[in-house]
C-alpha cells in the first residue's frame, strides 16, 4: 500500500523524442489510476519510469515517502503485469507463480537464515493468490494447456504473491478477445478491491479506462490533457480531445458562432441553415468576445443530449432541423445518424453530422427531415483554434464593463478605490477580473448564489448588481462582503490592455557552473586552506552557491557533462526575491503601491522585475532569489528541473 507522487516528470529518449512532458500527479493509497490515450502518447513510458525500467530524465518520483528515481526496480516494491504474459513454458502454473518469490532476497533472520522465503511461506502465498484468482485447480498445468484469460491470471498471480505496494499493469487485456476482456476487466476491479493496493493501469481503450479507474489520466503527445474521475471526464471535458476521446458514440461537434443580444444569444451553425436563439444565462462563464458573432467555436453535445421526442422538441428553446441518413438499431436503443446540412450525407464525420441516441422505436426513415432538441445544460463549447473549453468548470476570469473616474473604479453599480500603483485616464474600460482576485473582507456587497467543491478548489457563484461573478478565493462563510485584489486586474480599452495584472513571476537567464574555490578546512586540529570544486548557479551573470538539491537534479537530468553547457531559465516569485548586500544588480524604478501590499519595480538588465517590499527602496540594489521556491528550467528542451 502506498501513495505516489510524480513531480514535473519528463522523459527524453536518447534519440531526442520527448515522450513525456511535465507529468504532475499525486496518487493516493489504494487508488485505481488509469493512463489512457492513443498509441504513442507516452503512457507506457510513464508507467515504465514508475517501474524503474526507464530512467527519469527530469523530475521527482516518490513511492510512499521515498524518492525512488535512483532506486533499482527490484527495490521499489512494485509488481508489473504485461500484455504478453511471459510465462515460463516448461514450468507449471504453481512454479511460475512461486518462481519470483524463490529468487527474492529478504532480510536474514532466525526464520530466514539464508535470506530467502521459506517453502511454507511460498506455498501459502501461491495458494492464496490462486484462490483469489480462481485458478487453484490449474496449479499443476503448464501454460500451453491454458486459455489466454487463464494465462493472464497466472501472470497476475505472479504479481500478487510479491505483495507489492503498487501494481502496474501495461495493457494486460489487449491480447484477449472481446468477451474475455469484459470478464477480466471486472475481475481486475474485484482484485483491486480485495488487495487494497494502489493500481496503475495503462490502456488505449477508453471503455476499459471508464469502467475500471477511480481516476483517469488522459494523455496526448506526451502531455496530460486531464486528470479526473470517469464521471467528470464525461461531463466536464476540459478540451475537445478529451470530449471526443471519452464516450461512444463520439460526441457531436458542430462549428459555429455566437452573438449576444441583451439577454439572448444567437447561435449559428456553420455550413448549414441551423440557428437557435437561447438565454444568455447558459454562457455566464464565456469570455464576451466569443459572443461577438464572429469568433469561431465548436459546439459539443453528446448523442444522448439531443432528443427527437415531440415533447422535448416542443419545450426546448434550441431546436434544429436535420436530414436522416441511417439508423443503427442496437436492441435497447437506436442511434439515428443525420446531417444538419441538407446536402450532407450523415455517414462521414464532419462538422454538420449529427448522431442522436433514441429509445428502441424510431419511425424516422432515411431522407426524412426531422427536428431535434438540444439540451443546453449539457452543451460544451470549444475554441476552434486551441480546442480548449470556453465554458470551463472553473472560469479563470470575470469579464465586466467598468468606468474609471477620479481614481475610482466603478463596476456593477459598485465602486472601489484604485491603488496608487494603478494609474489610468478616466473613461470606459473592459475589466478583466480573475476569479482568484475576488476575496473576502471588503465593502462590496455580494449575494452568494451557490458554492461548489471542484477538486481542491471551491467555486463560488456570486451576484453583484444583478450580474454573475465567479470566485475561487473567498473564505468559507464570508462571501457577502468582498474586495478586489487590484494587483491581479486588467483594464482594456479599444482592445489595448491599458492596465495589466502585476507580473507575479520574474524570469532570469543563466547556466550552472563548476568553480574552484579556496575553503578553510580543519586538518589535524589546524585550519588550512584547500582548493575545492563547488557548483554555482549563474543567474544574470552573478554566481550563487548552488544548493545541493538543485545541482544534483541538474546533473541527473542533463548528465554531468552537459549540465554546465545548457542555458537555464530561472523563475522567481515577487515574494521570493530579497534585497541583499550582494546579488543580482537591480535599479529601483518606482514603488508600486497596491494598497495592502507594496512592490519595488526594478530594472534588471532590460527586464522589469517586481519585488515585494515594505521598505521605501530606491537607487541601486542587489537581489537574491529564494532557492527554496525558485523554478529552474532547462531552456532549449523546455524541461522543468526544479
Ligand atoms: P504509448 O504507451 O502511449 O503508446 P509510449 O510511451 O510507448 O506510448 O511512447 C511514447 C513516445 O516515445 C512515442 O513517440 C514512441 O515512439 C517513443 N518511444 C518509446 N520508446 C522509445 C525508445 N526506447 N526510444 C525512443 N523513442 C521511444
Image (tube, rainbow, N blue to C red):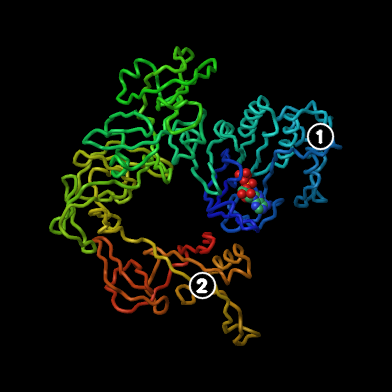
Above or below: residue 313 compared with residue 129: above
Q: Looking at this view, is 322 or 290 the one in front?
A: 322
Above or below: residue 93 compared with residue 294: above
Residue at (67%, 36%) from the top-left corner?
Answer: 172
Marks counted in the figure total: 2
Look at the image and tell me in which quarter the N terminus lies.
top right
Instruction: Check disc 1 and report the residue beneath it.
Output: 94
Q: Looking at this view, is 111 or 514 the one in front?
A: 514
Compare marks 1 and 2 and give the one earlier in the sequence.
1
In the displayed structure image, the side of residue 186 where residue 586 appears, left or right: left
Q: CA distance from mark 1 to mark 2?
A: 57 Å
Element under disc 1? helix
- Mark carried by residue 104: none
Above or below: residue 237 compared with residue 610: above
Q: Residues within 10 Å of mark 1 (few under 14, many from 20)?
A: many
Residue at (53%, 74%) from the top-left corner?
Answer: 536
Residue 173 placement (x, y as % from top left): 67, 33
Q: Residues within 10 Å of mark 2 (few under 14, many from 20)?
A: many
Q: Which residue is situated farthest in the front direction here?
A: 343
Residue 87 placement (x, y as % from top left): 79, 38
Instruction: Check disc 2 and report the residue beneath it.
Output: 537
Amino acid at each position: 500500500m502506498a501513495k505516489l507522487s510524480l513531480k514535473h516528470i519528463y522523459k527524453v529518449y536518447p534519440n531526442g523524442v520527448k515522450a513525456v512532458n511535465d507529468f504532475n500527479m499525486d496518487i493516493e493509497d489504494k487508488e485505481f489510476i488509469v493512463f489512457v490515450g492513443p498509441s504513442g502518447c507516452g503512457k507506457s513510458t510513464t508507467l515504465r519510469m514508475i517501474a524503474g525500467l526507464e530512467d527519469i530524465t527530469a523530475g521527482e518520483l516518490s513511492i510512499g515517502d521515498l524518492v525512488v528515481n535512483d532506486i533499482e526496480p527490484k527495490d521499489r516494491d512494485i509488481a508489473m503485469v504485461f500484455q504478453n504474459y511471459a510465462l515460463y513454458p516448461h514450468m507449471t502454473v504453481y512454479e511460475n507463480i512461486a518462481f519470483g518469490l524463490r529468487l527474492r532476497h529478504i532480510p536474514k533472520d532466525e526464520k530466514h537464515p539464508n535470506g530467502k522465503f521459506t517453502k511454507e511461506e511460498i506455498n501459502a502465498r501461491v495458494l492464496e493468490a490462486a484462490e483469489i484468482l480462481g485458478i487453484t485447480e490449474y496449479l499443476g498445468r503448464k501454460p500451453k494447456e491454458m486459455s489466454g484469460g487463464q494465462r493472464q491470471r497466472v501472470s497476475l498471480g505472479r504479481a500478487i504473491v510479491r505483495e507489492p505496494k503498487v501494481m502496474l499493469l501495461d495493457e494486460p487485456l489487449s491480447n484477449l478477445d472481446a468477451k474475455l476482456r469484459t470478464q477480466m476487466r471486472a475481475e481486475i476491479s474485484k482484485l483491486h478491491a480485495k488487495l487494497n493496493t494502489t493500481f496503475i493501469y495503462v490502456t488505449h481503450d477508453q471503455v476499459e479506462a471508464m469502467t475500471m479507474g477511480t481516476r483517469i489520466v488522459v494523455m496526448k503527445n506526451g502531455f496530460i490533457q486531464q486528470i479526473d474521475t470517469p464521471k467528470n471526464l464525461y461531463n466536464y471535458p476540459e478540451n475537445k480531445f478529451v470530449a471526443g476521446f471519452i464516450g461512444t458514440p463520439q460526441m457531436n461537434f458542430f462549428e459555429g458562432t455566437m452573438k449576444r443580444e441583451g439577454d439572448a444569444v444567437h447561435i449559428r451553425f456553420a455550413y448549414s441553415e441551423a440557428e437557435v436563439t437561447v438565454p444568455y444565462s447558459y454562457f455566464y462563464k464565456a469570455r464576451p468576445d466569443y459572443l461577438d458573432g464572429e469568433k469561431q467555436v465548436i459546439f459539443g453535445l453528446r448523442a444522448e443530449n439531443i432528443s427527437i421526442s415531440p415533447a422535448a422538441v416542443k419545450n426546448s428553446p434550441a431546436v434544429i432541423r436535420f436530414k436522416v441518413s441511417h439508423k443503427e438499431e442496437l436492441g435497447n436503443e437506436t442511434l439515428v445518424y443525420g446531417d444538419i446540412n441538407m446536402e450532407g450525407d450523415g455517414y462521414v464525420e464532419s462538422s454538420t453530422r449529427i448522431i442522436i441516441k433514441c429509445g428502441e422505436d424510431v419511425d424516422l426513415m432515411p431522407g426524412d427531415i426531422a427536428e431535434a432538441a438540444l439540451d443546453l445544460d449539457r452543451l460544451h463549447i470549444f475554441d476552434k483554434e486551441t480546442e480548449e473549453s470556453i465554458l470551463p468548470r472553473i472560469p479563470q476570469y470575470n469579464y465586466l464593463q467598468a468606468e474609471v473616474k477620479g481614481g475610482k473604479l466603478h463596476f456593477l453599480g459598485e465602486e472601489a478605490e484604485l491603488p496608487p500603483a494603478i494609474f489610468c485616464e478616466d473613461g470606459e474600460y473592459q475589466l478583466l477580473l480573475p476569479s482568484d482576485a475576488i476575496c473576502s473582507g471588503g465593502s462590496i456587497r455580494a449575494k452568494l448564489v451557490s458554492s461548489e467543491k471542484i477538486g481542491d478548489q471551491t467555486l463560488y457563484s456570486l451576484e453583484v448588481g444583478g450580474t454573475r461573478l465567479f470566485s475561487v478565493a473567498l473564505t468559507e462563510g464570508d462571501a457577502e462582503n468582498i474586495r478586489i485584489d487590484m494587483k491581479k486586474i486588467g483594464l482594456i480599452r479599444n482592445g489595448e490592455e491599458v492596465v495589466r495584472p502585476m507580473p507575479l513571476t520574474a524570469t532570469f537567464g543563466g547556466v550552472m557552473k563548476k568553480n574552484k574555490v579556496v575553503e578553510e578546512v580543519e586538518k589535524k586540529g589546524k585550519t588550512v586552506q584547500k582548493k575545492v570544486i563547488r557548483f554555482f548557479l549563474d543567474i544574470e551573470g552573478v554566481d550563487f552557491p548552488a544548493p545541493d538539491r538543485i545541482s544534483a537534479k541538474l546533473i541527473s537530468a542533463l548528465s554531468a557533462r552537459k549540465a554546465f553547457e545548457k542555458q537555464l531559465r530561472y523563475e522567481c516569485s515577487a515574494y521570493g526575491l530579497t534585497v541583499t548586500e550582494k546579488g543580482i544588480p537591480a535599479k529601483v524604478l518606482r514603488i508600486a503601491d497596491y494598497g495592502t501590499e507594496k512592490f519595488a519595480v526594478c530594472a534588471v538588465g532590460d527586464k522589469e522585475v517586481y519585488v515585494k517590499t515594505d521598505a521605501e527602496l530606491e537607487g541601486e540594489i542587489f537581489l537574491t532569489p529564494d532557492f527554496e521556491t525558485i523554478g529552474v528550467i532547462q531552456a532549449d528542451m523546455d524541461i522543468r528541473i526544479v
